[in-house]
């Protein structure tokens, strides 16, 4: 049962990471279409900002996928050896939350600075 629970949690993280990456690509494509339609200076700046945010979301998605895979692998290895699962003091959910918060603060700062 524990192994199946770990699989379910890892699949949820993969789904979430894929959502981040998809949203990043979609954001870039949306603002590229606006830039091509209007050709204004503001549209160019929005597209450039969207590229930064989109790439950051894709990177967060990749990091989340890698961390989920490593966490899953380590937990399964411990289960196979008959050891207890240890709850980390700094779980990777907190790591992803911090990355998203930093990205949000960067976005807010870049909006205020312009």
Image (tube, grey):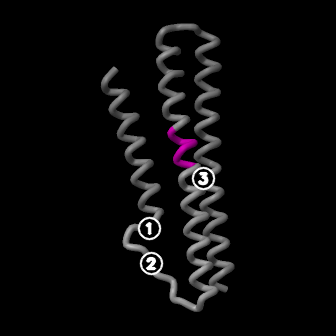
Residue at image coords 64%, 27%: 29
Q: Could you give the CA–CA distance between mark 1 and mark 3, rounded to whole angstroms?
A: 16 Å
Taking the image as shown, residue 86 lies to the left or right of residue 28, namely left
In what element is the residue under mark 2?
Answer: loop
Taking the image as shown, residue 90 lies to the left or right of residue 71, namely left
Q: Say whether marks 1 and 3 touch (CB < 8 Å).
A: no
Tell me if residue 100 comes above or below residue 56 in the rendering: below
Residue at image coords 32%, 27%: 112
**Which label sits on residue 91?**
1
Residue on which the image places disc 2: 87
Residue 114: image location, x then y, percent = 34, 20
Classify mark 2: residues with Cα within 10 Å, few (<14), some (14-19) or many (20+). Answer: few
Q: 87 or 41, which is in the foreground?
A: 87
Tell me if residue 110 comes above or below residue 86 in the rendering: above
Classify mark 3: residues with Cα within 10 Å, few (<14), some (14-19) or many (20+). Answer: many
Rendering quarter of residue 64: bottom right
Classify mark 1: residues with Cα within 10 Å, few (<14), some (14-19) or many (20+). Answer: few
Residue at image coords 64%, 58%: 14
Name the N-terminal-most of marks 1 and 3. 3
Tell whether position 60 is magenta. yes
Taking the image as shown, residue 94 lies to the left or right of residue 11, namely left
Taking the image as shown, residue 111 lies to the left or right of residue 20, namely left
Residue 82: image location, x then y, percent = 58, 91
In what element is the residue under mark 3?
Answer: helix
Q: Say whether marks 2 and 1 touch (CB < 8 Å).
A: yes
Q: Could you give the CA–CA distance between mark 3 and mark 2, rounded to whole angstroms?
A: 22 Å
Rendering quarter of residue 1: bottom right
**Which label sits on residue 17?**
3
First to last magenta residue range: 56-61
Residue at image coords 33%, 32%: 109
Q: Could you give the CA–CA distance between mark 2 and mark 1, rounded to whole angstroms?
A: 7 Å
């Amino acid at each position: 049962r524990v192994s199946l629970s770990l699989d379910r949690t890892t699949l949820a993280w993969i789904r979430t990471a894929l959502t981040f990456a998809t949203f990043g690509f979609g954001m870039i494509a949306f603002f590229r279409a606006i830039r091509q339609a209007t050709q204004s200076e503001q549209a160019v700046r929005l597209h450039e900002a969207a590229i930064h945010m989109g790439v950051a979301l894709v990177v967060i998605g990749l990091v989340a996928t890698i961390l989920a895979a490593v966490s899953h692998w380590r937990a399964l290895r411990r289960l196979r050896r008959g050891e207890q699962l240890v709850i980390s003091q700094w779980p990777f959910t907190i790591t992803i939350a911090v990355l998203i918060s930093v990205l949000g603060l960067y976005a807010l700062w870049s909006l205020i600075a312009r």
